[in-house]
Image (cartoon, grey):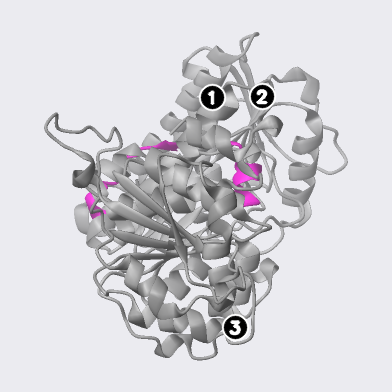
């Protein structure tokens, strides 16, 4: 459930060893056994059994874990060879202990030499245990050479804890960096494994318990979590199945007001409104400037259509803020989506809606509304609402909100989302691969489902509708945002599975699978 930084992992290790009394060698034995189990699982899943393993071992504890894994694989009947990146005679601490145990058992081993080619064809797979979470910067020397050769070997690679060359905290990949088929994350997932591009370099990530109690993470105040069904149920108290009592009715599940749409972008409001109903709310009102009402009649019969006086402009710039705020009275959530357009004084218009709308009505802002916030120099002084507003930017919008670049945002998505949520007391949903949900409490959830086919026009409109629906059903902003992201990703995965390729996925397909 927990996702940790390298420093948090170091403290957890030390707490388990010094305060709890679990010997370091016991944790290392558990880690090596867990890696060996994952290697055997890879073998069972392969068409041809993988019985010959090359273990690339560094001089630190990560390498020692790899040596332990070699022992357990040998015990299971596999052929193993431990290739040390450094002269093992210079090893110290636990690494020296594991070197000596392997030597006494007669495990085949050797030290890497740039002048001696590696017979990669002799092996069926590679266990990469060169550099651990404490490594910083680009690999050098023998480590860099081994990483490059392993990547070029064509053999499946199982990384121990984290691929060497990957920043454990940000997900940045250095040159070179192991491109793993699978990563056995020890005890807890590391942040770098769940943020692009590190998530791609790690391949399939499997978290392997090694005996460090999860309660230690809770005690140390770790607030970053994998977003999955377990987290929804245990951490957030939300039932992903969304079961309903038999005696409920449409009024039980809330009323969402979706304010979105223009002549050029009426589909955005339609998608959000449809997604809100599919998300489970009982009622949806779709608000548009009044000149747009007639052409939209009948487009979505399940929703109520409300035209707001627009002074004959046909645009949101002609709608008085208090008219939208008045319409929101009595509703259970207000979603302000794309199609607002831009006009002189638009940021002031949004601020007035923000202040005039009933404080008890949860608020979600996306797309054009986010750009209005980014242009509002006084956003930090806007009134705090009783329920934290939900903001759902993509990386470009997030960069504008932060006054930075997309590259800076993507360099540390978790850090960027958490910092903004804390500073402005909002729930921030940073969309994209591995969507990040950050709450003003400091909690951060990193989603693991979804697929590249969801990179399609309108997918964000669908997400906004789903989260708005959950807000209307009484979930807190933090619960609704996290649940909505997970449900959206799960629906996207089901939709992609029904098609020859995820590339054919469209936003309406996601709604159909909710």
Q: Is residue 422 left or right of residue 161?
A: left
Looking at the picture, tell me which residue is in the foreground, 452 or 325: 325
Q: Which residue is mark 3?
A: 375
Query: Dot 3 surroundings within 10 Å: few (below 14), some, or many (20 or more)?
Result: some
Query: Dot 2 surroundings within 10 Å: few (below 14), some, or many (20 or more)?
Result: many
Q: Is residue 490 left or right of residue 344?
A: left
Q: CA distance from mark 2 to mark 1?
A: 9 Å
Residue at the spot 62% in from the left edge and 75% down from the top edge: 400
Please determine whether, in this image, residue 70 is positioned above or below residue 461: above
- Is residue 208 part of the magenta span, yes or no? yes
Looking at the picture, tell me which residue is in the foreground, 105 or 59: 59
Query: Dot 1 surroundings within 10 Å: few (below 14), some, or many (20 or more)?
Result: many
Q: CA distance from mark 2 to mark 3?
A: 53 Å
Say whether disc 2 or disc 3 marks the residue closer to the N-terminus. Answer: 2
Please determine whether, in this image, residue 117 is positioned above or below residue 14: above
Q: Which residue is mark 2?
A: 125
Q: Which residue is mark 1?
A: 39
Point out the stretch of residues depicted in magenta.
196-216
Looking at the picture, tell me which residue is in the foreground, 446 or 280: 280
Label 1 SS: helix
Instruction: Locate residue 124, reporting x and y percent.
Output: 69, 19
């Amino acid at each position: 459930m927990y996702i940790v930084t390298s420093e948090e992992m170091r403290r957890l290790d030390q707490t388990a060893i010094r305060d709890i009394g679990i010997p370091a060698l016991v944790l290392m034995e558990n880690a090596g056994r867990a890696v060996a189990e994952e290697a055997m699982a890879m073998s069972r899943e392969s068409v041809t059994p993988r019985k010959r393993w090359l273990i690339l071992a560094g001089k630190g504890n990560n390498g020692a874990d790899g040596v332990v894994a070699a022992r357990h694989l040998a015990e299971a009947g596999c052929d193993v060879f431990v290739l040390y990146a450094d002269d093992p005679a210079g090893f110290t601490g636990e690494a020296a202990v594991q070197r000596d145990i392997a030597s006494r058992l007669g495990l085949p081993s050797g030290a890497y030499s740039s002048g001696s080619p590696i017979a990669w064809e002799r092996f069926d797979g590679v266990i990469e245990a060169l550099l651990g979470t404490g490594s910083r910067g680009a690999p050098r020397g023998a480590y860099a050479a081994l990483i490059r050769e392993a990547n070029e070997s064509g053999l499946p690679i199982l990384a121990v804890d984290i691929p060497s060359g990957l920043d454990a905290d940000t997900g940045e990949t250095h040159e070179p960096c192991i491109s793993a088929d699978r990563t056995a994350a020890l005890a807890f997932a590391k942040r770098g494994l769940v943020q692009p591009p590190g998530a791609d370099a790690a391949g399939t990530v499997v978290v392997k318990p090694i005996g460090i109690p999860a309660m230690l993470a809770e005690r140390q105040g770790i607030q970053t979590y994998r977003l999955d069904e377990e987290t929804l149920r245990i951490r957030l108290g939300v039932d992903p199945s969304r079961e309903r009592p038999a005696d409920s009715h449409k009024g039980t599940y809330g009323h969402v007001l979706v304010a979105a749409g223009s002549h050029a972008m009426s589909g955005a409001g339609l998608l959000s409104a449809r997604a809100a109903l599919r998300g489970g709310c009982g009622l949806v009102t779709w608000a548009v400037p009044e000149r747009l009402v007639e052409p939209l009649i009948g487009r979505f019969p399940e929703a109520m259509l409300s035209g707001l006086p627009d002074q004959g402009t046909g645009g949101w710039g002609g709608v008085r803020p208090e008219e939208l705020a008045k319409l929101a009275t009595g509703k259970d959530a207000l979603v302000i989506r794309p199609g607002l357009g831009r006009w002189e004084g638009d940021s002031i218009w949004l601020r007035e809606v923000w202040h005039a709308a009933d404080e008890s009505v949860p608020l979600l802002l996306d797309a054009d509304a986010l750009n209005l916030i980014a242009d509002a120099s006084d956003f930090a002084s806007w009134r705090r609402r009783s329920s934290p507003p939900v903001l759902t930017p993509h990386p470009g919008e997030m960069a504008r909100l932060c006054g930075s670049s997309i590259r800076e945002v993507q360099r540390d998505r978790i850090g960027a989302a958490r910092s903004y949520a804390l500073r402005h007391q909002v729930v921030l949903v940073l969309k994209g691969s591995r969507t990040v949900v950050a709450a003003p409490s400091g909690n951060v959830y990193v989603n693991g489902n979804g697929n590249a086919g969801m990179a399609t026009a309108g997918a964000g409109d669908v997400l906004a509708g789903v989260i708005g629906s959950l807000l209307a059903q009484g979930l807190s902003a933090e619960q609704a945002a996290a649940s909505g992201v997970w449900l959206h990703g799960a629906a996207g995965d089901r939709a992609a599975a029904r098609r020859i390729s995820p590339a054919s996925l469209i936003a309406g397909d996601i709604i159909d699978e909710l």
